[in-house]
């Protein structure tokens, strides 16, 4: 599904990712944990195609394709989705209109017929009922006037409608209270399938309690320094990231 | 000055005036015409040395010759297919009764044409056409006073509320020549009267006419006027328009201008809030793409006490388009308690485009609230990226954000129910732009 090989990324003069390796198989849920500044959000942005980053070495292969050669919209149409840590407010653009336009743009790219407004409405109703999202969010401008929790739930709603193959959740748990966190986790769990993979970037363990990842990675100083099962997340929670730092072999940076 | 006077444009307009002299048998009208003509001829055309014309060159226009419109131009009805009734239609400077339809309007709305008033009541027409000849930067209204032969003359009697919007269409029609036509419109609302009008400036065929018009508006005490103006003329058309409104006490003037077409469109909107408690809400959209030059100049004058003006204009500069906005607000001595707010936000999409914006606030009164601001920026990169990560191609994401940005001023029409019609006009124009310049251009 996704293979990241020795990825080096700079932003301005600063090297942020320094030889990152990661492999995600279909159906797997991988968690990436790490201290602030480790490069977690950069990884999400680079995978989604944000400008302003320079890949200086390494490669990213997604379903056999060179992911880094694709435009952001091409990545989306190929089934990649990024749930933003800070969803962007877009005044004047209706949430439903936007989502239908996005879905149809993806379908067009894949050579599938466009979905009409009736068909789209039906799809939306079905997703809403599962995710416990209020109808009124649909008729507002994208993320404008949404609470922090509503914004995150709107991201999961988009995820549900667009049905990607690889979903990257960038600190989707940040700023959420326990109830909102549970709803978001439930939404993600409903989307799990043998064909769909998740890359869950988080600072805390609590989202992982609800998501049960297959693999947990620790990202520190631009590299994966430790990988393991769910128990790794619990160890981190107990000992803090200082514990990881101690375990990084001195001089290991590539 | 003598150099400018000799320009082909001035010669051509002067020749039009020659042809008109024979028609003016009424001495008052003849006097008004000749005074206006003499003034315009004396002043020549304004240059960029004139403060009011600093950003709009008339060199190319000055070198062109225009002739008077031919009588009885044939109009393809599909040109106005999107304009509902009741409506009045002028094509190449002449009313077209066959396309006009005034059914369903109440008797208290008196509708005449300037051509009728010139024929039947020349003294009355002379009073309206009287022009201040002293100003060297107002030669187009002077030529209009000398040459105007047609226009809408609308009077609403006091207390009459008219709910159905009236559509005024001014059409430029390609007919083998470059025509200059001069229209003088007049709209008077009696005390407490209510009316909604939509001006449509449309083009049929690839004409390159010059349309010079003056629209004078008077709102009586407590009158409410909603006026929308859609300028979507042919790409070669030149429009020079003056709108002058005077608001009585507690009158409310709500207005939206969409500048979407033409090669050069200059609009001067002058509103005098003369009576106490008068309110002006005027928004606009300037879509300067292609090689279009759009110049809107506001001159808002607060004279009465406790008057309010709210002005929200948005502009776009793309390709090699040029957008000029001057937002002048003057709060006169004695206009205490005035409240004025002006916002002009602009998007500059391409390096070849240019935007010049200048808010000017002059205050001579006490206890005044005034705010103004103008910005020129690019599209929000974060928003563009967000839309693209959802699958929208760059061109589509750009169009979506641009449309959202430009649609905001339309909210001023919400109370009138005209918002949907104007929104359709703007969306159609944006779709056209996307088709013309969109995919692959960036």
Image (tube, coloured by chain):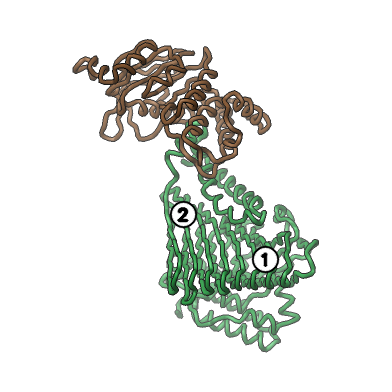
Chain colours: A brown, B green
Q: Residue at x 67, y 62 (%)?
A: B197
Residue B291 position within the rendered picture, expressed as x and y whole percent measured from the top left: 50, 55
Q: Is residue A147 left or right of residue B205?
A: left
Which mark is in front, 2 or 1? 2
Q: Residue at x 60, y 59 (%)?
A: B231
Q: Earlier in the sequence, mark 2 or mark 1?
A: 1
Q: Residues within 10 Å of mark 1 (few under 14, many from 20)?
A: many
Residue A16 position within the rendered picture, expressed as x and y whole percent measured from the top left: 29, 28
Residue where numbered disc 2 is placed:
B345
Q: Chain of mark 2?
A: B
Which quadrant of the structure image shows residue B380?
top left
Residue farthest front in this picture: A178
Residue A77 position within the rendered picture, expressed as x and y whole percent measured from the top left: 52, 26
Relative to A144, residue B174 above or below: below
Residue A150 position within the rendered picture, expressed as x and y whole percent measured from the top left: 51, 33
Q: Residue at x 52, y 20 (%)?
A: A186
SS type, badge 1: loop
Residue where numbered disc 1 is placed:
B92
SS type, badge 2: strand
Q: CA distance from mark 2 to mark 1?
A: 34 Å
Specify the quadrant that holds the C terminus of chain A: top left
Camera sees residue B233: no
Q: Nearer the viewer, residue B336 or B80?
A: B336
Q: Nearer the viewer, residue B300 or A12?
A: B300
């Amino acid at each position: 599904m996704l293979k990241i090989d020795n990825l080096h990324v700079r932003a301005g003069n600063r090297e942020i990712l320094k030889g990152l390796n990661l492999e995600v198989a279909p159906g797997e849920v991988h968690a990436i944990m790490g201290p602030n500044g480790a490069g977690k959000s950069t990884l999400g942005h680079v995978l989604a195609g944000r400008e302003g980053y320079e890949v200086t070495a390494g490669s990213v292969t997604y379903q056999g394709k060179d992911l880094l050669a694709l435009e952001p919209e091409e990545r989306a149409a190929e089934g990649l989705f990024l749930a933003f840590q800070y969803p962007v407010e877009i005044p004047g653009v209706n949430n439903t209109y936007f989502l239908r336009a996005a879905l149809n743009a993806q379908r067009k790219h894949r050579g599938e017929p466009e979905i009409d407004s009736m068909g789209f409405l039906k799809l939306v109703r079905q997703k809403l009922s599962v995710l416990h999202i209020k109808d009124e969010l649909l008729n507002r401008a994208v993320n404008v006037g949404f609470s922090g929790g509503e914004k995150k739930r709107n991201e999961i709603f988009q995820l549900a409608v667009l049905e990607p193959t690889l979903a990257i959740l960038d600190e989707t748990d940040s700023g959420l209270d326990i109830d909102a966190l549970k709803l978001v986790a439930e939404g993600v769990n409903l989307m799990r399938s043998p064909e769909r993979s998740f890359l869950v970037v988080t600072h805390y363990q609590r989202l992982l309690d609800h998501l049960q990842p297959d693999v947990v990675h620790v990202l520190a100083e631009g590299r994966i320094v430790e990988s393991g099962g769910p128990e790794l997340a619990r160890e981190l929670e107990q000992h803090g990231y200082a514990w990881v730092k101690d375990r990084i072999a001195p001089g290991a940076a590539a | 000055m003598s150099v400018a006077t000799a320009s082909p444009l001035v010669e051509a307009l002067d020749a039009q005036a020659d042809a008109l002299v024979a028609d003016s048998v009424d001495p008052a009208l003849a006097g008004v015409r000749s005074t206006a003509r003499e003034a315009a001829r004396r002043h020549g055309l304004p240059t960029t040395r004139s403060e009011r014309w600093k950003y709009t060159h008339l060199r190319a226009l000055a070198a062109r010759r225009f002739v008077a419109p031919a009588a009885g131009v044939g109009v393809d009805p599909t040109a106005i297919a999107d304009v509902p009734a009741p409506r009045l239609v002028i094509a190449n400077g002449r009313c077209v009764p066959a396309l006009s339809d005034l059914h369903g309007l109440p008797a208290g709305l008196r509708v005449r044409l300037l051509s009728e008033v010139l024929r039947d009541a020349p003294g009355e027409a002379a009073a309206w056409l009287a022009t201040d000849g002293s100003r060297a930067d107002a030669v187009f209204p002077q030529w209009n006073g000398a040459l105007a032969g047609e226009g809408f003359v609308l009077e609403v009697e006091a207390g009459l509320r008219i709910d159905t919007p009236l559509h005024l269409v001014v059409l430029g029609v390609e007919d083998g020549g470059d025509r200059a036509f001069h229209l003088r419109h007049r709209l008077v609302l009696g005390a407490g009267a209510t009316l909604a009008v939509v001006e449509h400036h449309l083009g049929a065929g690839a004409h390159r006419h010059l349309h010079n018009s003056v629209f004078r508006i008077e709102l009586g005490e407590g009158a409410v006027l909603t006026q929308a103006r859609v300028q979507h003329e042919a790409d070669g058309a030149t429009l020079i328009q003056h709108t002058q409104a005077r608001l009585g006490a507690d009158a409310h003037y709500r207005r939206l201008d969409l500048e979407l077409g033409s090669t050069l469109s200059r609009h001067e909107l002058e509103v005098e809030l003369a009576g106490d408690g008068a309110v002006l809400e005027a928004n606009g959209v300037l879509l300067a793409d292609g090689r279009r030059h759009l110049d809107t100049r506001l001159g808002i004058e607060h004279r009465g006490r406790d008057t309010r003006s709210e002005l929200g204009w948005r502009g776009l500069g793309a390709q090699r388009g040029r957008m000029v906005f001057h937002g002048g607000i003057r709060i006169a001595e004695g206009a205490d308690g005035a409240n004025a707010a002006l916002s002009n936000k602009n998007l500059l999409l391409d390096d070849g485009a240019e935007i010049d914006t200048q808010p000017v606030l002059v205050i001579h009164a006490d206890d005044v609230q005034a705010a103004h601001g103008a910005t020129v920026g690019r599209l929000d990169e974060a928003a563009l990226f967000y839309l693209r990560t959802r699958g929208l191609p760059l061109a589509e994401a750009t169009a979506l954000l641009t449309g959202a940005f430009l649609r905001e001023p339309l909210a001023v029409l919400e109370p009138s129910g005209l918002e949907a019609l104007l929104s359709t006009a703007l969306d159609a124009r944006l779709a056209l732009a996307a088709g013309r310049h969109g995919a692959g251009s960036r």
